[in-house]
Amino acid sequence: MNTEVSIAGITFKNPVMTASGTFGSGMEYGEFIDLSALGGVVTKGVSATPWEGNPTPRVCETPSGMLNAIGLQNPGAELFIKRDLPFLRQYDTRVIVNVCGHTEEEYVDAIELLNDTSADMFEINISCPNVKEGGIAFGTNAKSVESITKRLKAVSKKPVIMKLSPNVTDIAEMARAAESGGADAVSLINTLMGMKIDIEKRKPFLANRTGGLSGPAIRPVAVNMVYRTAKAVKIPVIGMGGITSGEDALEFLMAGATCVCVGTANFREPYSTIRTVVGIEKYMRNHEIEDIHELIGCVD
Amino acid sequence: MNIIRQRMTVVSNDCLQPGIFSMWLKNRAITELAKPGQFIDFYLKDPSRLLPRPISICEIDRENDRVRIVFRVAGAGTDEIAHLDPGDTIEAVGPLGNGYKPQNDGAVLLVGGGIGIPPLLELAKQLKCKKTVVLGYRDENTFLADEFRQYADVLIATEDGSVGTKGFVTDCIEQNDVEANYVYSCGPMPMLKNVAKMAQEAGIPAYVSLEERMACGIGACLGCIVKTKEKDSHTNVKNARICTEGPVFLADTLDW
Ligand SMILES: Cc1cc2nc3c(=O)[nH]c(=O)nc-3n(C[C@H](O)[C@H](O)[C@H](O)COP(=O)(O)OP(=O)(O)OC[C@H]3O[C@@H](n4cnc5c(N)ncnc54)[C@H](O)[C@@H]3O)c2cc1C
Ligand SMILES: Cc1cc2nc3c(=O)[nH]c(=O)nc-3n(C[C@H](O)[C@H](O)[C@H](O)COP(=O)(O)O)c2cc1C
Ligand code: FES
């Protein structure tokens, strides 16, 4: 049975990775699972300098989902390279570093710092709904998606995945713009902008007022966006949004995703990533599928 | 492995007063590691409620492989837990957080307010020195007070004056001239702030236990931070994770 997939010439032993920001740099969930069993680990967003993030409350639960407004708090590239990357490199798994910035220059700075490390790829977050500058500002206009992709591709020594926002009229258009800019792959979806109000306090629950919705609640939206995007571009698509199991992941693969990421599900079940790997294999055995590529994009 | 994910079996579940439950849960691995001031994340059966519910450890009974929690029904999640019967099991991850570091020299003051009282019980039991416990309640429903009396001198403050000092725990401490070398405290934020201020004025260290909205509970999501005065070594910014570096902090290290 073959579960190996590849993106930009880099192979993954299976298509299951972690979703950025839900898995730190692997250390915490590494207490529960063997990271070497995963196709890859996508790290929390890393910027050139340390970021403080937003005030609290930063998270709240919603039906079958949650809102977060962490604000991309991170220790900065230097400490990440010194501490987190070597930790991840102990495992036989691909390491994708998620990169964030407030300005184009900051993305460039982060990539330059990370270029000569052992990271396998970069995932560029142009879709965070929780920071005022940067993040989503770059990801909601096709022209700016294309131009930032071009700029970062010129700087990067590693394959570049552009992470797309669902908070747009047509995500396939953004994917095409990333493809024109030279992206090696696109990943989607980042969180959907949302809000929850505490009716007793008559205030938003989150200090940031709004946050990004994730978890099973967004899964059908994500599957549809992955489906439409996979039809629109030739580069590989990495799918995510509410995946908790092999069955959920298979929907994304059949919709056209080459890889999938498991995010919020980790909070409910620390073994979610492994369960997803095992679930996909079980389906393949039960349905006598020899090669996972028979499933990828099999839905018309 | 310092964090265990296993099912815990409900040994008993008693209602202490309307809306407040005391539950003993059996699990050897979690009990063996448990320290006072740590907490356990409980996972709900309802699949639409994704996030685990953090509840503090109130007592540890190593002989019988069980820990006790005392909690208030605050919403649907704690309501589900309150409906568990002896023999039922619940998915748990723990013990989490750093817990209190018991200091056994001199005199210690323990200050608890409301649902912040339970986590101090095991600490009161374990401390070997002279100890005074000050408990703050809203009214005459003074849950756990008698249990604290087994281990320490207990003073009570109630907001409505029905028992002990009328007012807050800080009023009670002042009126009774309580002397101490260390303070341990858990309760609502305004209370913790006042206790920390009192301790600072008296020039003694105060350990406070904080609460924040959490998602992962194990340090991965950065949902639960508190502002600190110095750069935290894990986050590399002036934010510490309450679920991991806390929930107990030396009050002086926080940027209140
Ligand atoms: C470290 C720690 C220790 C705690 N120890 C205790 C304890 O010993 N006894 C006790 O009664 N309560 C304790 N709490 C508070 C307890 O976690 C909440 O009351 C509980 O999560 C409420 O869940 P719910 O579904 O009933 O309420 P809902 O309001 O429906 O919960 C919705 C969401 O908000 C979160 N939430 C709601 N209130 C709080 C709160 N005060 N703190 C953190 N998250 C909250 C829930 O976890 C859930 O994700 C502790 C909290 C923390 C952070
Ligand atoms: C707490 C939290 C933090 C996140 N941080 C990041 C981040 O730093 N960078 C990023 O590109 N996406 C981030 N995301 C988005 C996820 O990677 C993912 O796109 C989204 O949550 C949908 O997947 P899920 O439903 O499986 O969680 C974060 C999501 C959550 C819940
Ligand atoms: S709850 Fe996730 S870091 Fe504390």
Image (cartoon, coloured by chain):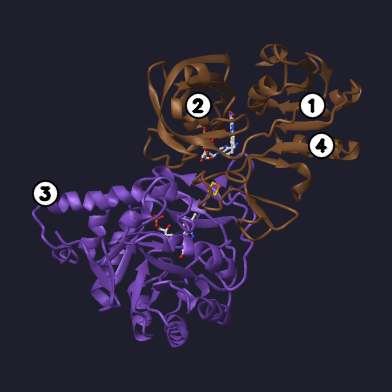
Chain colours: A purple, B brown
Q: Residues within 10 Å of mark 1 (few under 14, many from 20)?
A: many
The answer to which of A261 and A225 lies nearer the viewer is A261
Mark 2 = which residue?
B31
Q: Do labels 3 and 2 share a chain?
A: no
Going by the numbered disc 4, the residue's amino acid type is Asn
Element assignment for label 4: helix
Q: Mark 1 lies on which chain?
A: B
Pointers 4 and 3 in contact (CB under 8 A)? no
Of circles 3 and 2, the one toward us is 2
Q: In this view, does B116 lie to the left or right of A153?
A: right
Q: Mark 2 lies on which chain?
A: B
Report x, y in % for residue A226.
Answer: 29, 66
Report x, y in % for residue B68.
Answer: 54, 21
Going by the numbered disc 3, the residue's amino acid type is Asn
Asked whether mark 3 lies closer than 8 Å to ligand 2, one says no
Pointers 4 and 2 in contact (CB under 8 A)? no
Q: Residues within 10 Å of mark 4 (few under 14, many from 20)?
A: some
Element assignment for label 1: strand
Which residue lies at the image location 23% right of the left edge and 73% below the top edge? A231
Going by the numbered disc 1, the residue's amino acid type is Val
The CA span between labels 1 and 3 is 63 Å
**Residue B108, numbered circle:** 1
Report x, y in % for residue B184.
Answer: 74, 31
Report x, y in % for residue B104.
Answer: 75, 27
In primary-sequence order, the first of circles 4 and 2 is: 2
B163 versus B209 height, above or below: above
Mark 3 = which residue?
A286
Mark 4 = which residue?
B194
